[in-house]
Image (cartoon, grey):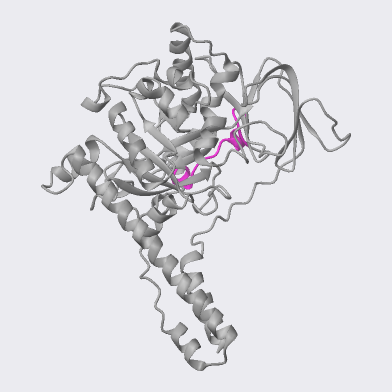
Amino acid sequence: MRSILAVLLSVFTATVSATPFPSTYQPLPSSPTLITNATILTGDGRRLDEADMYISDGKVVWVGEGTVPSDGVNTIDATGKWLTPGIIDVHSHLGVYPSPGVSAHSDGNEATAPVTAEVWAEHSVWPQDPGFSRAIAGGITTLQILPGSANLFGGRSVTLKNIPKNTYQAMKFPGAPYGLKMACGENPKRVYGGRKQAPSTRMGNVAAYRASWIRAQRYIRDWEQYEQKMAKQSANVEDSSDSNSALAAALIKPPKRDLELETLAGVLKGEILVHMHCYRADEMMTILDMADEFGYQLGTFHHGVEAYKIADELAKNDVCGALWADWWGFKMEAYDGIQENIAMVDRPENSCAIVHSDSDEGIQRLNQEAAKAMSKGQAAGLDIPPERAIRWITSNAAKSLGIAEQTGTLTPGKMADVVIWNQNPFSVYAKAQQVFIDGAMVFDRDNSALQPVSDFELGQLLEAAQ
């Protein structure tokens, strides 16, 4: 009887704990590399002039000074150049809204119900999107792919390493937690209110969030009660040879599995990060109160053109702001934006300001977007040197995605995701000269063999050449 119960327990446990669609990412082959004489921005607030860095086995070994093997090391003279961690974009729709932008490729919004937490963005990612290679040329080594913002709960996001592969599984950042895309404000109420269904107002938005969290809480309780019952019956079987105890355990039915509630429950249990599309300060404060009500940690507000109004509250609540440098005014909730937004969100102690793209074009020059925000902040009297601003597109972004222990800074032991720039990356003339991911050079501006081309684009180029 014990063996029967063990089988039942293992089946039900596997049902709820198996990890589907696992990452198959493998670092590309790399060679030990010494980069010398560069101006290095480490991503953790330091700047080193005329400094060296050594990478090996896909990891940062040392920055500044250290020993180097006498043989088998590739040396790059970076005199006059700048070195930074790989750039991270926390808000991208590459692959789910790929180029060319045709309806057949429009896979980012499951706009069929206001709550679609059950969908996963990775299942829409097209790895052949030429946007990925364009992003590499802009120094992007890691990016989060999000569903769109039509829904209150739009579904799970996925974090990818920006390497050319045939499958999204081979691009999935190893160990990166999932995110949940949520949206407040105009988009959900416009999409569903236009269909004469709820939500059609902001109060309808909030009511639907809360109802969904309540269902998720109940789902968690149902599973906990089931597990408690199974544990009790298991103890009874161990203490007795009575066949009725094993039969009673076998008759305990698990709760019905629900993909939507699995995702929401993952947030409440701290396993899935929340990425919240929200513009207005008053709405962001409502969302913070809602997170307190249901006991989950809000991770990042995206877009947040009014985040500057509540910068201290964001820092106090350990919430990041993933923001545009200067997009504003394209709808009413984006009306009160200012170009000092990012710099002001960055000002408080323990802040987490991030520059994001939300654009297949902006992702190609995220360093210049950061430069615009840096310039406006300096004009407002804030002291923002390059070694501080670089965090907006490296370490802060890594924190937002839950991968700061693996990447985002040039810290020994972390992934050797590195960009060599031809000059100060905050110059309008800056270009990514060479890009490394896990120590492997994946882009070289002077070597066409190291300028990735997607299979889709390659076909177009061959046809055009005929």
Pick whichever, 446 or 373, lies toward us. 373
> Relative to residue 139, is residue 387 depicted above or below?
above
From this viewpoint, which residue is outermost toward the right?
A: 70
Q: Is residue 299 left or right of residue 142?
A: left
Tally of numbered tags: 0
Q: Furthest-left residue in view? A: 196
- Front one among 271 and 220: 220
Seen in the image, is 360 located left or right of residue 46? left
At x 39%, y 25%, the residue is 324
Asked if residue 398 is among those painted magenta in the image, a careful observer would answer no
Quadrant of the drawing holding the N terminus: bottom right
Q: Which residue is more in the foreground, 397 or 103?
A: 397
Instruction: Give the vertical position of 264 relative to 141 (above or below).
Output: below
Q: Is residue 311 visible?
A: yes
The image shows residue 142 at horizontal and vertical percentages of 53, 38
Numbered range of the magenta stretch: 442-459
In the picture, the quarter occupied by the C terminus is top left
Relative height, residue 172 to residue 315 (above, below): below
Nearest the viewer among 231 and 398 is 231
Residue 331 in sight in this render:
no
Q: Position of residue 195 (x, y in %)?
A: 12, 47
- Residue name at image x 51 percent, y 52 percent: 166
Q: Quadrant of residue 240?
A: bottom right
Image spot of residue 376 (x, y percent): 43, 11
x, y percent for residue 61:
76, 35
Left or right of 37? Residue 307 is left
